[in-house]
Amino acid sequence: MAPMATHVITGAGSGIGAAVARRLHERGDELVLVARDLKRAKELAEQYPGARTLVADLADPDRISWALGKQAQPEQVDTLLHIAGIVDLGPIGELRPRTWHQQLNVNLIAPAELTRLFLPQIRAVRGQVLFVNSGAGLNAHAEWGAYAAAKHGLKALADSLRHEEKPNGIRVTSVYPGRTAGPMQAKVHSQEGKEYDASRWIDPESVATTILTALDLPRDAEINDLTVRPGR
């Protein structure tokens, strides 16, 4: 990818998103970081000097268009990186609609809405949309029903988008990391009642390397689906 590309990124505050944002920032690319509120936006702006921020709560997709409409938009968007996500485990027999809505909103509907809103800029430069999915987007296990349903939906979103936008020259990539060390993994272990040992899982930097590989791949090819598993 050409230097000084502009990347819109969700989830830049921690885990995989932070690793990706840091690497892109260090090489001099332009960052536009989506934050859920003004406080988080200020923190991200301090963390990545020179980066721009957009405030939009992914938990409330119906208001994303309204929120972004009140803020200055980036004129150029080379890549849209969907990295934010939430997880809440529980058996199907106990999950109430609120839990389903929360996970579907953040993990599926918000990415769909952000994609819709930024497609004109991405089409203009024949850019790329990358979704950080999950192993749960390919296989659903006990107590992962709501999260896996959202991530299976995210795979469908990416696959449909790839077919629709191919004539416009847009590349669409899904990355399916296995368990990756970070705050989300610590929460999962807590919900599973298991002791958390970060050294057992993928380092976010390793996933960031795979994401940058997909972004920097020469334009004669695209990585559609990339699965990353723990090597230990």
Image (cartoon, helix red, strand yellow):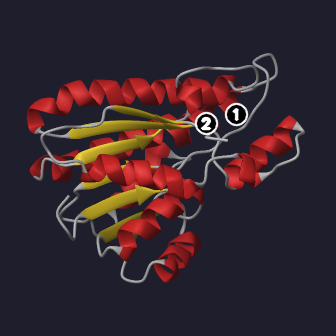
Label pair 2/1, CB-CB below 8 angstroms = yes
Using the numbered discs, state the Cα–Cα distance from disc 2 to disc 1 in whole angstroms.
6 Å
What quarter of the picture does the C terminus occupy? top right
| Quarter residue 74 falls in | bottom left
Give the residue pinned by disc 2: 103
Q: Which mark is residue 99?
A: 1
Q: Position of residue 31 (x, y in %)?
A: 34, 69
Q: Residue at x 56, y 70 (%)?
A: 40
Query: From where the camera sits, is residue 101 visible?
Result: yes
When the figure is inspected, residue 30 is found, relative to residue 89, above or below; the finding is below
| Secondary structure under the numbered disc 2 in the rendered image | helix
Q: Residue at x 20, y 69 (%)?
A: 3
As drawn, the residue found furthest toward the front would be 232
Q: Position of residue 110 (x, y in %)?
A: 45, 42
| Secondary structure under the numbered disc 1 in the rendered image | helix
Mark 2: give few (<14), some (14-19) or many (20+) Cα within 10 Å: many
Query: From where the camera sits, is residue 55 visible?
Result: no
